[in-house]
Image (tube, rainbow, N blue to C red):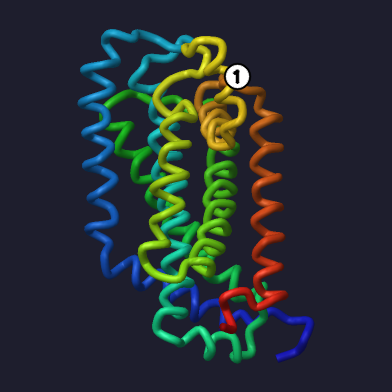
């Protein structure tokens, strides 16, 4: 392989291996978000939505759709990427991967690409499920698709870091369950932060997940809790930090070679 060429065969092998694992549990992987989304609409959309009315001119049932999608995409991106790289560490095959003629960039691209693909598929499944319950209008479809992919890639990179850091399967759930999930629920997934008292509105501005959800909601309805420029900037900063951390991991061999 020439140094200036990508090892496409190696990347394809890793990518297809990860996607094959997804296909083996396809029914469970797709059924779970569909059922969960339906339950959210029954509980939040019907029972609570009738009392809340509209938010920013959008019905409550439609308002929570971007939040529901982001909840799944964030969580699944972290879980898929962390599990994908942690399994080779757990089985010991990570050393074969590190000694193979494939660069760190190609390795990360394959693992993260597969994890992001799974998350995007699940996000689109939730979007399709939601459209069965309520009429949806996406004002900026190209932005919605691009933003969805960018979020999936960013958090898949973060999941890759978690998978390398984790010493056991218990650690894989630590960050998603104790950090990301609470931040997601407190980040305006089911409400606008403008509905909160002033001190809590200010506190929400320090929640990075709020910027992610707000930017995605803007692609649907042209409105968000913060300006779209702030959402883009926040997401790009997170992507840059995650990329730098992954570079440092391969540079130092942190928990990869020991």
The number of numbered badges drawn on the structure is 1
Q: Which residue is drawn at 73% across and 81% down?
A: 5
> Residue 96 at what x, y percent from top left?
52, 90
Is residue 12 among the parts visible in the rendering?
Answer: yes
Seen from the viewer's position, the closer of residues 111 and 243 is: 243
Relative image position of residue 124 (x, y in whole percent): 40, 45
Q: x, y percentage for residue 129?
A: 29, 38
Residue on which disc 1 sits: 202
Relative to 189, residue 162 above or below: below
Secondary structure beneath dot 1 equals: helix
Position above or below: 73 against 41: below
Quadrant of the image occupied by residue 131: top left
Give me the residue at 48% from left, 13% from top. Answer: 196
| Relative horizontal placement of residue 208, taking residue 33 as reference (left or right) | right
- Above-or-below relation of 169 to 226: below
Instruction: Work out whether residue 223 or residue 210 is closer to the camera in this orientation and state it.
Output: 210
Residue at 54% x, 36% y is: 209
Q: Position of residue 237 (x, y in %)?
A: 70, 45
Image quarter in which the C terminus is found:
bottom right
Badge 1 density bin: few <14, some 14–19, many ≥20, Cα 10 Å: few
Q: In which quarter of the image is residue 21?
A: bottom left
Q: Is residue 9 visible?
A: no
Question: What residue is drawn where x is 55% and y is 17%?
Answer: 201
């Amino acid at each position: 392989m020439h140094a200036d060429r990508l090892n496409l065969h190696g990347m394809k092998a890793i990518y297809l291996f990860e996607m094959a694992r997804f296909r083996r549990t396809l029914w469970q992987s797709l059924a779970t978000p569909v059922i969960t989304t339906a339950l959210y609409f029954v509980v939040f959309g019907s029972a609570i939505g009738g009392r809340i009315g509209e938010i920013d001119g959008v019905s409550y049932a439609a308002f929570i759709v971007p939040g529901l999608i982001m909840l799944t995409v964030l969580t699944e991106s972290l879980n898929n990427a962390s599990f994908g790289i942690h399994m080779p560490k757990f089985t010991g095959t990570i050393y074969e991967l590190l000694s193979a003629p494939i660069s760190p960039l190609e390795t990360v691209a394959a693992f993260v690409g597969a994890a992001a693909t799974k998350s995007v598929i699940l996000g689109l499944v939730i979007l399709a499920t939601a459209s069965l319950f309520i009429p949806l209008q996406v004002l900026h479809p190209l932005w919605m698709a691009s933003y969805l992919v960018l979020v999936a890639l960013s958090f898949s990179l973060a999941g890759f870091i978690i998978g390398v850091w984790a010493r056991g399967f218990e650690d894989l759930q630590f960050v998603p369950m104790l950090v990301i999930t609470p931040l997601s629920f407190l980040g305006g997934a089911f409400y606008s932060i403008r509905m909160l008292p002033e001190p809590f509105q200010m506190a929400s501005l320090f929640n990075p997940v709020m910027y992610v959800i707000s930017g995605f909601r803007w692609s649907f309805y042209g409105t968000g809790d913060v300006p779209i420029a702030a959402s883009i900037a926040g997401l790009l900063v997170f992507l840059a930090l995650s990329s730098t951390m992954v570079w440092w991991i391969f540079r130092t061999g942190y928990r990869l070679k020991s």
